[in-house]
Amino acid sequence: MARVIKENKFQEKVTFILNDVAEVVLNWNLGHITNDEAIKKINSAFAKQNFFTS
């Protein structure tokens, strides 16, 4: 049971990150943000979900 909960949390984190990254990529492709801004926002998406710490 604990493993299922942990897997669901992981999937939830990944979904949030992918949504944020997709939005950044779209804005970057449309020319609304620079490369540096895109990289900062993508890094922020990972940091916001504590992806690498848990």
Image (cartoon, rainbow, N blue to C red):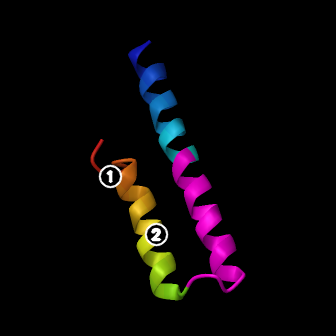
Asked whether 36 or 2 is in front, the reply is 36
Mark 1 lies on residue: 52
Would you place residue 34 above or below residue 17 in this image? below
Horizontal placement of 48 versus 23: left or right?
left
Q: What residue appears at the point 44 percent right and 12 percent down from the top-left corner?
A: 1
Residue 20, horizontal then vertical, whole percent: 56, 58
Q: Identify residue for label 2.
A: 41
Question: Are there few (<14), some (14-19), or many (20+) residues within 10 Å of tag 2?
Answer: some
- What span is colored magenta in the figure? 16-33
Could you tell me residue 16's position as x and y percent?
54, 47
Residue nearer the viewer, 10 or 25? 25
Task: Please identify the quarter of the rendering in which residue 26 is found.
Answer: bottom right
Q: Main secondary structure of the magenta part?
A: helix
Image position of 36 with respect to 49: above or below:
below
Residue at 52%, 86% in the rendered image: 35
* Alpha-carbon span between mark 2 and mark 1: 16 Å
Where residue 22 appears, as percent x and y from the top left, is 64, 63
Callout 1, which amino acid?
Phe
Towards the viewer: 14 or 44:
44
1 or 41: nearer the viewer: 41
Residues at circles 2 and 1 in contact by the CB criterion of under 8 Å = no
Q: Can you tell which of label 2 and label 1 is closer to the viewer?
A: 2
Q: Residue 37's spot in the image, x, y percent?
A: 47, 80
Q: What's the residue type where badge 2 is placed?
A: Lys
Q: Residue furthest left?
A: 53
Instruction: Work out which residue is located at the far right of the displayed protein and give it.
Output: 30
Q: Quadrant of the C terminus?
A: top left
Say whether residue 28 is magenta: yes
Residue 30 covered by magenta stretch: yes
Q: Which quadrant of the figure has residue 29?
A: bottom right
